[in-house]
């Protein structure tokens, strides 16, 4: 059995002299306590030295990636024919077995052998001193770390993080400078702020015009439309602003130059960020856009860190404060963070924004992992997922329209109309109310007709009063018949108790009779009061007619006198 050991100077192959000691893993450490005892366990068979640092770096990177370099393959073919090889990495052993057809072993005994060889390395390999081994390992580690940094310059997402941070700072500075220009020049020409809304156009107009008296002589067609230009020139003539000196105008123009230069640099920076995003994360850019994708990467720290996050974390990335506040107060958690500014979420109606943001976060997580760990550089996956999300959005909007029209399937729920049924699930059917024509008020009534109506109404109120006691008498007769039948069936010893019950029943009946009589009296009194009110109305109408007739009689008398004269 052979043992493959990697050193900063090269590869070493050790021959295991006593394989029986490998069965006792706990005692292997004691065998390497001294150089002499270590020589009895293993012996150096071959050593492959690295020619330069580049070769050592290539071999080290291949071993880290669990693959074999050309030098290692040549070395093993020459020295490992028909032997079993012990390796420190199982993946490296599988690669050697696939390519070189050499049986490899990786277990606890092999790892214990590696540990013992490392402790006595300078004694087992002649010509390798301790003072030489330390600088070799240090130089190899430095070159390896430099190689990892330069591994993929196109995949460096630090540039994106810095660019999006600078872009946000530029937006803040531009807004501050533009507001300062508006406020400063507003003392001279206050009407211009309402005419021109865009900050860049405002700065260009101020730089070209200077004093407002020059507006009539200048041509603003390259900056403004004809309507806005005509409105500006009219406002410049009747402006209420104060006069400004030449020194003040010069400083305002210099501030306008700063605004314009910053806007130009911002446009260049945006183009640079767009190109870098299409290179580093093309699928994420196709899904959410350049700015939102860059902000997600900056918030996550790097593209690789963002690839480790699940879709639920990406969905609320940027809304951490709202999330923890909702958890603390036991309210609803936020549905979206930075993804709210994506175009797909903006297209969705308010009720569907939560669903679309959740779907977009899931697809964005897949796109980020594909961009960070995949080999291809195209955006086919992102474009395909975006089309799926757009189709889902249209489907959700169609479902919402169907629900608003009727049921979930798009068919309206039509129920049969029943005028007698009350509202509610357990409504009872009641008879419909009839129309009462006597309640109508008719103009121009004669006193005979009003008296007839009053008589009809009084008769209608008296009829139910008469019917009520009749119905009460029928009930009494029925109850008496029942009691007679009960008395005939009862035992003679129980008649005393029934007599007492009969006395109580008679008292209850008397109370009912009194209540019914009181109700009849109240109805009669109400009818009399209604009759009195109607009589008063008749008297008032008669007086009004007499008053209306008086002026007509006076007019006739005046006409007669004129005719006689």
Image: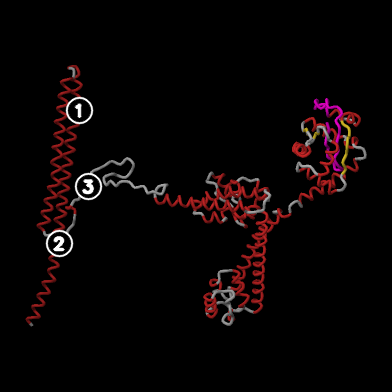
Residue positioned 12% across, 56% down in the render: 450
* Upstream in sequence: badge 1 or badge 3: 3
Q: Which residue is mark 1?
A: 504
User: From this viewpoint, is residue 185 visible?
Assistant: yes
Q: For numbered disc 2, what is the local secondary structure? A: loop
The quadrant of the rendering that contains the N terminus is top right
**Magenta-tinted stretch:** 1-28
Q: Image quadrant of residue 521?
A: top left
**In front: mark 1 or mark 2?**
2
**Taking 153 as reference, is 554 above or below it?**
below
**Do labels 2 and 3 touch, CB within 8 Å?**
no
* Circle 3 SS class: loop
Q: Which mark is in front, 1 or 3?
A: 3
Q: In the displayed structure, does residue 343 sit left or right of residue 473?
A: right
Q: Disc 3 marks which residue?
A: 433
Q: Bin the neighbour count of mark 1 within 10 Å (Cα to Cα): few under 14, some 14-19, many 20 and up.
A: few
Residue at label 2? 444
Label 1 sits on a secondary structure element that is helix
**Which label was assigned to residue 165?**
none
Q: Earlier in the sequence, mark 2 or mark 3?
A: 3
Is 431 covered by the magenta stretch? Answer: no
């Amino acid at each position: 059995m052979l043992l493959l050991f990697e050193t900063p100077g090269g590869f070493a192959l050790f021959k295991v002299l006593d394989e029986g000691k490998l069965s006792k893993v706990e005692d292997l450490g004691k065998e390497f306590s001294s150089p002499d005892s270590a020589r009895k366990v293993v012996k150096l068979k071959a050593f492959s030295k690295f020619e330069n640092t580049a070769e050592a770096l290539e071999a080290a990177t291949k071993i880290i990636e669990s693959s074999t370099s050309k030098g290692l393959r040549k070395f093993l073919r020459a020295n490992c024919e028909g032997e079993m090889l012990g390796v420190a990495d199982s993946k490296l052993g599988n690669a050697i077995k696939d390519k070189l057809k050499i049986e490899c072993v990786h277990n606890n005994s092999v790892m214990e052998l590696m540990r013992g060889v490392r402790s006595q390395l300078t004694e087992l390999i002649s010509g390798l001193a301790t003072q030489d081994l330390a600088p070799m390992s240090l130089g190899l580690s430095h070159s390896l770390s430099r190689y990892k940094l330069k591994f993929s310059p196109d995949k460096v997402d630090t540039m994106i993080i810095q660019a999006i941070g600078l872009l946000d700072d530029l937006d803040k500075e531009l807004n501050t400078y533009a507001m300062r220009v508006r406020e400063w020049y507003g003392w001279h020409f206050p009407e211009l702020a309402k005419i021109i809304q865009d900050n860049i156009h405002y700065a260009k107009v101020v730089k070209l015009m200077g004093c407002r008296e020059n507006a009539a002589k200048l041509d603003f067609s390259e900056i403004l439309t004809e309507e806005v230009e005509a409105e500006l020139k009219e406002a410049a003539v009747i402006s209420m602003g104060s006069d400004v000196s030449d020194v003040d105008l010069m400083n305002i123009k210099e501030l306008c130059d700063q605004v314009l230069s910053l806007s130009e640099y911002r446009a260049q920076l945006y183009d640079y960020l767009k190109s870098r995003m299409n290179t580093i994360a093309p699928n994420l850019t196709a899904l959410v856009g350049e700015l939102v994708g860059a902000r997600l990467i900056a918030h996550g720290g790097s593209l690789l860190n963002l690839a480790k996050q699940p879709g639920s974390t990406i969905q609320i990335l940027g809304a951490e404060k709202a999330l923890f506040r909702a958890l603390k107060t036991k309210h609803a958690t936020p549905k979206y963070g930075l993804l709210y500014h994506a175009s797909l979420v903006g297209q969705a109606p308010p009720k569907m924004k939560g669903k679309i943001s959740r779907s977009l976060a899931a697809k964005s997580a897949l796109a980020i992992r594909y961009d960070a760990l995949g080999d291809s550089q195209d955006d086919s996956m992102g474009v395909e997922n975006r089309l799926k999300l757009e189709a889902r959005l249209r489907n959700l909007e169609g479902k919402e329209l169907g629900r608003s029209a009727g049921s979930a399937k798009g068919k309206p729920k039509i129920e049969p109309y029943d005028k007698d049924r009350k509202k509610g699930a357990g409504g009872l059917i009641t008879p419909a109310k009839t129309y009462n024509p006597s309640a109508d008020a008719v103009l121009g009534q004669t006193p005979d007709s009003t008296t007839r109506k009053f008589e009809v109404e009084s008769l209608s109120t008296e009829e139910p009063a008469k019917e009520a006691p009749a119905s009460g008498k029928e009930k009494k007769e029925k109850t008496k018949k029942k009691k007679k039948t009960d008395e005939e069936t009862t035992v003679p010893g129980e008649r005393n108790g029934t007599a007492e019950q009969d006395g109580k029943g008679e008292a209850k009946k008397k109370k009912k009779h009194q209540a019914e009589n009181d109700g009849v009296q109240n109805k009669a009194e109400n009818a009399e009061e209604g009759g009195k009110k109607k009589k008063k109305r008749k008297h008032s109408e008669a007086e009004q007619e007499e008053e209306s007739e008086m002026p007509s009689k006076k007019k006739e008398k005046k006409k007669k006198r004129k005719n006689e004269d």
